[in-house]
Amino acid sequence: MSDTRVVLDPTGERQAPTRERTPRPATLDGLTVGLLDITKARGNVFLDRIEQHLTARGGRVVRYAKPTFTKVAPIDLRHENSEKCDVVIEALAD
Amino acid sequence: MTVSLPDGLVAVVKRDCPTCRLVTPVLAQLRRTAGAPPLTIYTQDDATFPPDLDPVDDTGLAVSLALDLDTVPTLVRVEHGREAARLVGWSREQWEAFTGIPVLGGGLPPHRPGCGSRTQDPDVVAARTEAAGAGTLTARRVPLGASEDDAEAMFERGWSDGLPVVPPTPERVARMLTGTTRAPGEIVTVVPPDLVECSVEKVAINAVLAGCRPDYLPVVLAAVEAACTDEFNIHGLLATTWFSGPVVIVNGPVTRAIGMNAGINAMGQGNRANATIGRALQLVVRNVGGGRPGEIDRSTLGQPGKYTFCFAEREGDSPWEPLHVTRGCAPESSAVTLFAGEGPRGIVDQLSRDAESLANTFAACLRATTHPKLALAFDALLVVSPEHARVFREAGWGKAQLLDELMSRLQVPGAELVRGAGGIAEGLPAAVEGRTIPKFRDGGLLIVHAGGGAGLFSAIIGGWASGPAGSAPVTKEIGT
């Protein structure tokens, strides 16, 4: 081969967009907290406890669950999360 | 391609053509004859032929291609650098009229057909097709540095699974694309986890990397399409901490056509088609989809089948209809079935000579898949070897009967499965106590026939989270 060897790119040729993180709130006062259960076994135990703590402090909590932990959350669920919640806590358990 | 042709007569010949050798004295006569147009002779295969007539070397075929020749000898009249007329083969009458020289080729037969021009040779046509195809490819072209080692360059760019890959030059990719009738730009599917549209060309590039031959490409395309369905769920399969990866089982005439192995060491090393088709699928997921170990791929231990896991079903002497037919395909079709599997584990039974006893063995071993106290969450693929299959053939057990017999033996009392039972914390919730739980969901146990003719051993390939909650086996017919 000569010095002008060329190969074709086997990748998706995609640059992942860089997105800024949403600023973290200094307090949860007055905010709605979504609790997203990905349906891994016993993730609900963790989220139940979080919910108890938050509601005891007068927080607003909305519970969500993915249909299955093996697949990405359906777009409707993600949309509802972003519309109704100021903050989301997602539980992964194993 | 433009070439400039000398005015006068142009003859194109090759030594390999008997008619060209026959007309050599005629060409010599034209050179000698006063008043004959100047004659230039181009030779396609031997720069010294015809001897003593000062031929012009056209072994690179530039002139022959410019003239778009079908036949040699071809005699062309050139005026002002352009072709004015042409003759093919040998006909004394036509050559005399064409050249204006009376009495040409005395002693030769009056006519002989010519031979095929070298430009029509299959290897030349294929090379030209590749060259033309290479020019139409749209993937980003990556130049390699003068001092770079080609094999090392593939590793450094992150395109390898850890083993050496074949550099995907445009020529190799164009040759790979001759294996399919599909257009390079056609979108095959969207590949997770990055959800990137994947063209036939991108699959071909990764098939080159994997070491595939062009005739494997339709199988790879079908496997990629099957993997990227919602039912198969390659995204989840990739992300899981479990061992599993895509296992590709190939059925139908294509397996014989491309020389796949369904016999001795069917699931092992040594067969190019088995090895590279499974690898190409994994490389598409890695390179196009962005699914790399340690990133989206979170497997705790992984398993060697994640390099490649692909084999053919042994159909010729199977007692059962092939897997793809069980799953709804026509018997004459070829298809891939993808299963989310771990590595194979062996089953020994060298003593069972009746179907009931052997089914008991299979059921006992299947019960232990994943964990003897877990049920319904994982599928399994049972690979029955020819010597074990013979026992069922002799008993007249069809595949459906074997499946029914196994499922009936795999109805487990809940008391044995509950957490704590047997001194084992792992297990199902207490609610199953008093119930009978099937080990596998309906449709969660697949049976195929493969392996060498000697050995009373079969294999279980355990699955992953099964069905709509995880991955379901997917069968896809192989196109062209």
Image: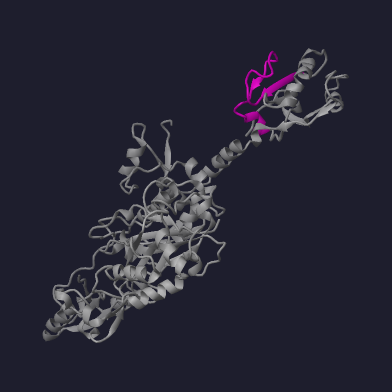
In this rendering, the answer to whether B20 lies above or below A8 is above
Residue B184: tell me if it is visible. Answer: no
Residue B290 locus on image (x, y percent): 34, 56
In this rendering, the answer to whether B190 lies above or below A94 is above
Identity of the residue drawn at 32% across and 62% down = B349
What's the magenta region?
A: B38-66
Residue B71: tell me if it is visible. Answer: yes
Q: Is residue A70 magenta?
A: no
Residue A72 locus on image (x, y percent): 32, 70
Identify which residue, B201 or A81, lies in the foreground. Answer: B201
Report which quarter residue A28 is drawn in. Answer: bottom left
Report which quarter residue A59 is drawn in. Answer: bottom left
Identity of the residue drawn at 66% across and 36% down = B120
Identify which residue, B218 or B439, lies in the foreground. Answer: B439
Residue B109 locus on image (x, y percent): 84, 24
Report which quarter residue B94 is drawn in. Answer: top right
Its colouring scheme is one colour
Q: Is residue B395 left or right of residue B67?
A: left
Q: Is residue B53 magenta?
A: yes
Q: Which quadrant does the C terminus of chain B fall into? A: bottom right
